[in-house]
Amino acid sequence: MSELLKVSSNPHIRSKVTTSSIMTAVVIALLPAAGFGIYNFGPRALAVMAVTIASTVLTELLFGWLWKKKITITDMSAVVTGLLLALNLPVSIPLWMAALGGVFAILVVKMLFGGLGQNFMNPALAARCFLLISFAGKMSSFTLDGVTTATPLNVMKTAWKAGESNLGVDLMAMFIGKIPGTIGEVSVVALLIGAAYLVFKKVISLRIPVTYIVTVAVFVFIFGRQDLNFVLAHICGGGLIFGAFFMATDYVTSPITPKGQIVFGILLGVLTGTFRLFGGSAEGVSYAIIISNLMVPLIERYTLPVAFGKEGKKA
């Protein structure tokens, strides 16, 4: 019988891309930011990374062993979660808190909902928000050269609310990364190098990040100050670049439809701008992404393309 008559079950088109290859690419893309974090904050930044990665990997391993589930640590997703969490933490955080965040990310947000692909929000960001709520003081204590100081966004927000013309921020220092903040968010140039690698490897598209960043820029220009330096400081400051390229683009928790990704990016931008300008904190990226993650099913429902044929037409 001819080979052409053989029929197999779907899927009929398969890709050589695997979960482990995608996650490995993300780890490689995060190395510039991680390396700069170690250079900027010292060996303790490496210790935080080691603790969070160990806690996420071990939690996933123990969960699979205790509940007789398939061991999935080889797909590298737990490593990515641990590294993302570490880069979202201040270098001065107690190591046991960092470990607790890793356990929460994997056990509560990922595994209890069915594992990779079933989590409804980004595990690393969910863990960061959990730590922010539980240990606000430790999570908002930022150091540079061993000195505890306010982040540029905090300084700028205070100056803006006071009506001062001098924003008190150094854009070049923000771009390079010689500023206080979390381990991985401070250097825009390091993050952009990693983002360029992800785009080159076709792991992510620019649809969500660009829409997100442009929306924040427009929002702070309209509702904040009509000042280019003010807008650029909001783009370079905090976790916007980090969140836009490395967390908002998460396959599981972002829309799959092109129109949905545009809507998602706009929602992210509006929420981030609202939190930063009118909220109690100068930041807002983490909460904006978490809230937008919860809206993804609704976004996809209304942005699905119409199927071919009259039966596919929307009522």
Image: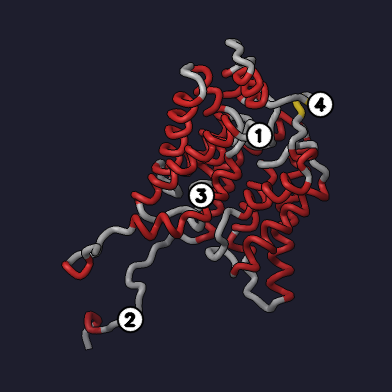
Q: Position of residue 185 (x, y in %)?
A: 62, 35
Q: Which is more N-terminal, label 1 or label 4?
A: 4
Comes first in the chain, label 4 or label 2: 2
Give the numbered dot on residue 146: 4
Q: Nearer the viewer, mark 3 or mark 2?
A: 3
Marks 4 and 1, how far apart at CA: 26 Å
Query: Whole-Å distance between the Cαs marked 4 and 3?
Result: 35 Å
Kind of residue sitting beneath label 1: Gly
Sequence order check: which comes first, mark 2 or mark 1?
A: 2
Residue type, mark 3 in image: Ser
Q: CA distance from mark 3 to mark 2?
A: 39 Å
The amino acid pointed to by label 4 is: Gly
N-terminal of the pair, mark 3 or mark 1, is 1
Label disc, if present, on residue 8 of the rendered structure: 2
Q: Nearer the viewer, mark 3 or mark 1?
A: 1
State the residue at coordinates (58%, 53%): 122
Question: Whole-percent x and y of residue 203?
Answer: 45, 49
**Residue at image point 33% right, 68% down:** 13
Mark 2 or mark 1, which is nearer to you? 1
Q: Is residue 155 above or below residue 140?
A: above
